[in-house]
Image (cartoon, helix red, strand yellow):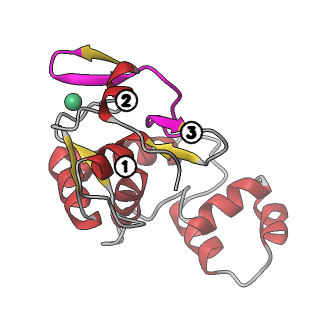
Amino acid sequence: MTAIITLDEIKARCEEVGDCWIWQGATSDTGYPIMKRGAGPCLLVRRVVAGIKGTPPAARQPVVVTCGEKCCCNPDHVRISTVKKVAEAAAKAGAYSSIDRCAKVAKARRTAPGAKLNEGKARDIRLSAKTSAALATEYGVSLSLIKSIRAGRAWKDYASPFAGLGARVQQGRTAA
Ligand SMILES: [Zn+2]
């Protein structure tokens, strides 16, 4: 364990905006406050705050803030959550309607003149036993596009009842 970090120390690195303590230090790739102590690993500041409050989160347990500010570290706003709760909150905040919107945007793009693929072809690509390279040649698209389709990132099947699931689970995962 690294040296003990205090709330004062964390607060000193934040700017108070209203009730929030907005982190002024480094952030992770996904935009969440991080700090480093000596030679120790990078720590997610909110997880540290939760630990100081006496409720250290378990390994994959999400820590959220009630104010919704991505960089807020105010211990009064920091809460330990569960993946399920994060998914529910995301749904309430419009994850479902955004799936709807994504489907509309995707439809417009997919029916644009010159589009090399269509939903049927995308489904064939997902189900095909051929290599991604072979499919890229066959459909005249890039290898990375084929890989994205197979990973479910591109050409999502919005007709599938599972279409929204990936995004919601991901929301849970990216919460610091
Ligand atoms: Zn806050």
Which corner quadrant of the figure contains ligand 1? Answer: top left
Q: Give the mark count.
A: 3
Q: What segment is highlighted magenta in the picture?
A: 17-35
Q: Amino acid at mark 3?
A: Arg
Q: Is residue 11 above or below residue 161?
A: above
Which kind of residue does numbered mark 2 sit on? Answer: Ile
What distance separates the C-alpha of mark 1 from that of mark 2? 12 Å
Foreground disc of the pair 1, 2: 2
Instruction: Check disc 3 and report its element: helix, strand or loop.
Output: loop
Tell me, yes or no, whether the highlighted magenta stretch contains residue 133: no
Answer with mark 1 or mark 2, whichever residue precedes in sequence.
Answer: 2
Amino acid on which disc 1 is placed:
Arg
For the residue pair 124 and 87, the one nearer the viewer reads as 87
Mark 3 or 1, which is nearer the eye?
Answer: 3
Mark 1 surroundings: few (<14), some (14-19) or many (≥20) residues within 10 A: many
The residue at 38%/27% (across/down) is 9
Specify few, some or many for label 3: CA neighbours under 10 Å numbering under 14, 14-19, or 20 or more.
few
Please indicate whether residue 63 sits to the left or right of residue 127 in the image: left
Q: Which quadrant of the structure image shows residue 8? A: top left
Asked if the residue at tag 2 contacts the one at tag 3, i.e. Cβ–Cβ closer than 8 Å, the answer is no
The residue at label 2 has a CB less than 8 Å from ligand 1: no
Instruction: Report the residue that reaches farthest toward the bottom.
Output: 129
Residue 47, label in figure: 1
Determine which residue is flagged by label 3.
37
Estimate the spatial distance between the alpha carbons at disc 3 and disc 1, rounded to whole Å. 14 Å
* Coordinates of residue 62 in the picture (x, y in percent): 33, 57
Q: Which residue is mark 2?
A: 10
Q: Please tell me whether mark 1 sits on a helix, a strand or a loop.
A: helix
